[in-house]
Image (cartoon, rainbow, N blue to C red):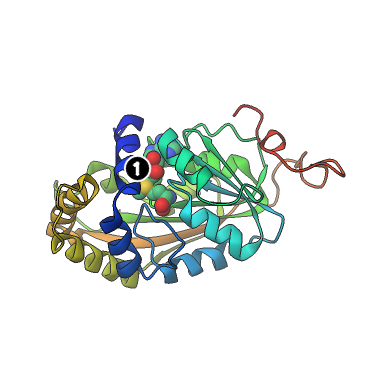
């Protein structure tokens, strides 16, 4: 299983790589201000925004937020208040310094034990990271626990298709969002295949392989990944999974009461342990 030290180094390398930023912006057609640690396209981001149905002032949690680019952009477009969590302290430090603090907080936490209070989130997003949950359903159960009744979840991921070769990483081979969202207690589950996102991913990997890595460790690791992924590209499919937390959940002690009148919102009213 991947650990925080591996991701800390990867995040530091990626943040220091102009080639990475250029390749991702172009292949994924992202707005220039959105930093990406994943393979979600600009059009895909718009679909995530629509799926979350989060309103101004509501709490949006970005689980495994990386450097926070997607979460910040969703918060900017919707007016939601963002709580970003990642187990990499390096990613969280970068995320916290990449934009204004007024509408966003970032914390170091494992998404299988995020430490947020029950029903404290109005919407949860998890972009290209659920496969790292050990197992993924453990992270989805936490999404269900922290979401308010009727709260929305959007997860982007890859799933195996048919008999999958051993070259596809084990973390991808075990992803089955329809099954796991049901087991985690969600309703209105939809898992939709996204061929256009997958095509953009192929373009990105091909662009990476055509770029001189010139001692750039982020690019070198992207090229290694590209070779591995392209060799078994059709053994996976790209998906957007959306779901709703059941209406009959527990009462939500925080919403409508916090922050107290005249006080600024803070992590304390969203989390008891971070
Ligand atoms: C492919 S990156 C995606 C980052 C971000 N969501 C984005 O789209 O830019 C995967 C992220 O998952 C984080 N991660 C992996 N396992 C985690 C865990 N158990 N808890 C929290 N974060 C985790 C990594 O540090 C990394 O930032």
User: Would residue 154 be seen by someone viewing this image from the given angle?
Assistant: no
Could you tell whether 260 is left or right of 123 in the image? Answer: right
Please name the residue shown 13% across and 64% down the image. 210
- Residue 138, given in percent of the width and then of the height, sits at 45, 37
Q: Quadrant of residue 87?
A: top left
Indicate yes or no: mark 1 CB to ligand 1 under 8 Å: yes
Q: Nearer the viewer, residue 56 or 197?
A: 56
Could you tell whether 170 is left or right of 65 in the image? Answer: left
- Residue 46, given in percent of the width and then of the height, sits at 50, 69
Q: Nearer the viewer, residue 178 or 69?
A: 69
Q: Quadrant of residue 257?
A: top right
Please name the residue shown 15% across and 47% down the image. 215
Please name the residue shown 42% across and 68% down the image. 42
Q: Work out which residue is located at the far right of the displayed protein and give it.
A: 261
- Residue 118, given in percent of the width and then of the height, sits at 66, 37
> Can you say whether 25 is above or below 98 in the image?
below
> Which quarter of the figure is the C terminus placed in?
top right
Name the residue that disc number 1 marks: 11
- Residue 265, given in percent of the width and then of the height, sits at 74, 43
Could you tell whether 16 is left or right of 85 in the image? Answer: left
Q: Quadrant of ligand 1?
A: top left
Could you tell whether 18 is left or right of 188 in the image? Answer: left
């Amino acid at each position: 299983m991947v650990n925080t030290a591996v991701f800390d180094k990867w995040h530091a390398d990626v943040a220091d790589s102009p080639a990475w930023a250029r390749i991702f912006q172009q292949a994924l057609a992202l707005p220039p201000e959105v930093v990406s640690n994943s393979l979600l396209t600009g059009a895909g981001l718009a679909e995530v925004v629509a799926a979350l149905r989060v309103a101004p002032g509501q709490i949006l949690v970005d689980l495994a937020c990386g450097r926070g680019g997607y979460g910040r952009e969703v918060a900017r477009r919707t007016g939601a208040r963002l709580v970003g969590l990642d187990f990499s302290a390096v990613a969280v430090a970068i995320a916290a310094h990449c934009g204004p603090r007024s509408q966003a907080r970032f914390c170091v936490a494992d998404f299988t034990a995020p430490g947020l209070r029950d029903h404290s989130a109005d919407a949860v997003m998890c972009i290209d990271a659920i496969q790292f949950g050990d197992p993924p359903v453990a992270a989805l159960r936490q999404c269900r626990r922290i979401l308010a009744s009727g709260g929305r979840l959007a997860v982007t991921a890859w799933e195996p298709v048919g008999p999958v070769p051993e070259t596809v990483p084990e973390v991808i081979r075990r992803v089955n969002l329809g099954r796991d969202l049901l087991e985690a207690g969600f309703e209105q589950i939809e898992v939709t295949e996204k061929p256009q996102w997958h095509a953009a991913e192929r373009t990105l990997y091909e662009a990476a392989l055509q770029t001189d890595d010139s001692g750039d460790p982020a690019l070198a690791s992207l090229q290694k990944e590209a070779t591995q992924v392209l060799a078994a590209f059709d053994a996976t499919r790209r998906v957007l999974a959306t779901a709703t937390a059941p209406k009959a959940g527990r009462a939500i002690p925080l919403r409508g009461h916090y922050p107290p009148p005249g006080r600024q919102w803070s992590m304390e009213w969203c989390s008891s342990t971070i």
